Amino acid sequence: MTAGAIAWRPNPLQMFGVAFNYTAATAMFQHAYNICRVKDSEVGEQGKVFRADLERTFDILNAGHYKGYCSMEWEGPEDPYEGTKKLIARSLEYLA
């Protein structure tokens, strides 16, 4: 691998499925206190898009009484500025 190259590795959503990920998020938010990454989709190796239920994820975050920061990460086919803007708006809606 050369400097700056990123090796593709599957996301747990792709590897273990939806049920595992929500179980893991529930366990994580019982202990998380500083920062989490908000991302509503992941693009796989063959270009397949895996989607997360953002409302359900924020329900888990809120139930865990998480008080840390939420950083935004956009990955998708549309303009990253527009995608991030929409992700921020949806996140604020679910945090309200």
Image (tube, helix red, strand yellow):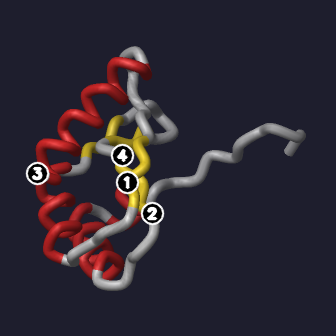
What residue is disc 2 on?
A: 35
Outermost right residue: 2
Of the residues shown, which amino acid type is indicated by label 3? Ala
Q: Quadrant of residue 56?
A: bottom left
**x, y percentage for residue 78?**
36, 17
Q: Give whichever of discs 4 and 3 has the lower sequence position.
A: 4
* Disc 4 + disc 3, Cβ < 8 Å: no
Left or right of 48: which side holds 66? Answer: left
Q: Give whichever of discs 1 and 2 has the lower sequence position.
A: 2
Q: Quadrant of residue 19?
A: bottom left
What residue is disc 4 on?
A: 39
Q: Up-down: is 57 above or below 67?
A: above
Kindly identify which numbered label has been placed on residue 70. 1
Gap in Å between the C-alphas at discs 4 and 1? 10 Å
Gap in Å between the C-alphas at discs 4 and 3? 18 Å
**x, y percentage for residue 3?**
88, 40
* Disc 1 + disc 2, Cβ < 8 Å: yes
Q: Disc 4 vs disc 1: which is toward the camera? A: 1
Gap in Å between the C-alphas at discs 2 and 4? 13 Å
Gap in Å between the C-alphas at discs 3 and 1? 14 Å
Left or right of 58: which side holds 25? Answer: right
What residue is disc 3 on?
A: 96
Give the number of marks. Answer: 4
| SS at circle 3 | loop
**x, y percentage for residue 10?**
51, 54
Estimate how packed mark 4 is, as few (under 14), some (14 to 19) or many (20 or more) residues with alpha carbons within 10 Å.
Answer: some
Q: Disc 4 vs disc 3: which is toward the camera? A: 3
Gap in Å between the C-alphas at discs 2 and 3? 18 Å
Q: Give whichever of discs 4 and 1 has the lower sequence position.
A: 4
Residue ID at (30%, 67%): 21
| SS at circle 4 | loop
